[in-house]
Image (cartoon, coloured by chain):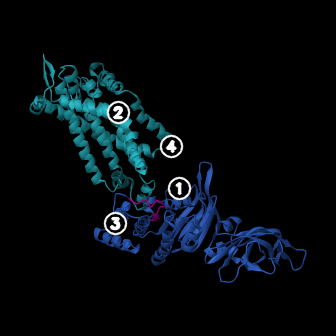
Chain colours: A cyan, B blue
Amino acid sequence: MSMAADERNARAPWALTAPALMLFVGVLLIPLAMTVMLSFHDWGQYKGIEPVFILKNWHEIATDPYYAEMFWRTFRIAILTTLLTALLGAPEAYILNRMSGRWKSFFLLVILGPLLISVVARTLGWALLFGGNNGLVNKLLMSLGAIRSPIPFMFTETGMVVALAHVMMPFMVLSVWAALQRLDPQIENAAMSLGAGPVTIIRRIIMPQIMPGVLSGAIIVFSLSASAFATPAIIGGRRLKVAATLAYDEFLNTLNWPLGAAVATLLLVALVLIVVGSNALIERRYAEVFR
Amino acid sequence: MAYLELDRVAKQFGAQTVVDDFSLSVGKGEFISFLGPSGCGKTTTLQMIAGFLDPTRGAIRLEGKDLTAIHPAKRGLGIVFQSYALFPHMTAAENVAFGLEMRGVPRAERSERVRAALAMVGLAGYEDRHPRRMSGGQQQRVALARALVIKPSVLLLDEPLSNLDAKLREEMQIELRQIQRTIGTTTILVTHDQNEAMSLSDRIVVMSQGKIEQIGTPQETYEKPASAFVSQFLGKTNDFPGMIDRVVSPTQLVAGSWRAPAPAGLGGPVTVSVRPERIGFGDTGLSAKIITRIFQGNHWLFQCDSECGPAIVIRQNDGKPQPAEGEAVRLTWRPEDMSVRGGASA
């Protein structure tokens, strides 16, 4: 009898997690596996998709410099976006943390508010401000005589980085904010009593302790930026493609699903490697601060 | 001359007065405790000395110089925080060295002083440990070493032992006292633990609701509490209602059936306060019945129901037979063992 009970106990965790597990397998693992398989299939203009196993798509990606340029651009934009959010987001979170009660909650709402607005709407906002001759800011600056031709923003990497940084900022602020919450509230007083000035306190005491927060924020921002679709699609359009918009075009315009699948799979694998690798590095480096 | 002087210091947060009319002069090398329940303003006072808060009124002087005009980073005080506030990303040695580094002490001298400071608190060999890898007591010692290594003019301790377990706390009390005696740093300790205040300090400042109730040596505050609050807060006490009878001659102080010659200059109703360990069982005195009797090893604790209300009696376990529960007894004490409060002056 007790053996039966033991057996039941051993099965219980599986039974209880089964619904979530099945959902996970059904909507994530199976489509993912199918995408990977798809990347090995053949495709032709007139014959469509042929379920065979060939390395044609992978060979094309590996040899055609067009794809290398695309991936290089994707990661360049993601890295610059990450740097920009870290440079602006970390001080933002620190200032926010030092504000008093009411202002703190108000500005936290201001920072998190954009998360409630669609990425498309936010990116179109930038397009309205800087989009060519009709952009609001461009018009204003030109009528004031400050610039002669519109500031190039649409279809530029700069534009993409700026718009992406705007979209990703809440993730960085939240991540640094969480690290700041773990700080001993007396730590700045302790440093001050030992003779440290404000700059030294930030550089020697605060920065090293919130660095894990900045880095985990950076991982989130980097992976979201590298796989972002809406913002690059609106700002870059067809002229300035990144990996995500490239995969989209292969799927929906060229209808070359296997090639699109190969691009998507490569992006996924690269991202996973980068994220897992940097995460391991960070955890080793900041073992004493984490724990 | 006073080394550290607080002159009618007050702190207000909005309309709320947290500390009021706080005056104290501390001699060089003295160990002072601010003792009181939470919210009595003791930590606020400490933070004003440290410079993390500015007093609303009053002056704080160190060796005659106005301390409030000096930025907290330049005051040169050593502070141990309740949470220790160690820098988690630095090793023990780096934590201790930080203050010296800020003072521009050359590297060789710095490492020598850090080593000596850690050795003083019994942490020789722990130089390269990070705080998170140390026990609470060890972190406490690092915090103490960090505060002392800069040779502070005053050492401020904000409930430093409250996060330790009872046994460790006792050990640290003894050690803290020894270190303070050895190096002779003027020290101010904030605590809500009366045992800690009594065993460590030269003088205790008992505080309640932002005001000083009494300043005195541990014995003075225990034996001669200036107010009902002090006698209640510092250990257990019995308060009996009494009356000074001026009709008979000589005048007598009467509490129930206990009587003694009245102290001079008082009349009318008074409160008689007697510590439980000063009450004995005798043939005359306050009549009472023993409700419970608890054996606590080195002493017996009796809870009695007396004619003047409930009473607690503590007797040393001297091996002699003690009265049993339910037994009727007479409670008696020497007049010099009580303190009398109230009473109109006559």
Badge 2 element: helix
What stretch of residues is rendered in magenta?
Answer: B76-87
Name the amino acid, label 3.
Ala
B149 or A278: nearer the viewer: A278
Q: Are marks 4 and 3 in contact (CB under 8 Å)?
A: no
Q: What residue is disc 1 on?
A: B54
> Do the residues marked 2 and 3 share a common chain?
no
Which chain does the numbered disc 3 sit on? B
| Spatial separation of the CA atoms under disc 1 and disc 2 | 59 Å
Q: What residue is disc 4 on?
A: A101
Q: In the picture provided, is B255 more to the left or to the right than A215?
A: right
Name the amino acid, label 2.
Leu
Q: Nearer the viewer, mark 1 or mark 4?
A: 4
Crowding at mark 3 (Cα within 10 Å: few <14, some 14-19, many 20+) = many
Crowding at mark 1 (Cα within 10 Å: few <14, some 14-19, many 20+) = some
Based on the displayed image, in which of its 4 quarters is residue A255 positioned?
A: top left
**Which quadrant is home to the N terminus of chain B?**
bottom right
Q: Nearer the viewer, mark 2 or mark 3?
A: 2
Crowding at mark 2 (Cα within 10 Å: few <14, some 14-19, many 20+) = few
| Spatial separation of the CA atoms under disc 1 and disc 4 | 21 Å
Whether residue B346 can be seen here: no
Residue B169 percent coordinates (x, y): 50, 69
Q: What residue is disc 2 on?
A: A23
Based on the displayed image, in which of its 4 quarters is residue A193 positioned?
A: bottom left
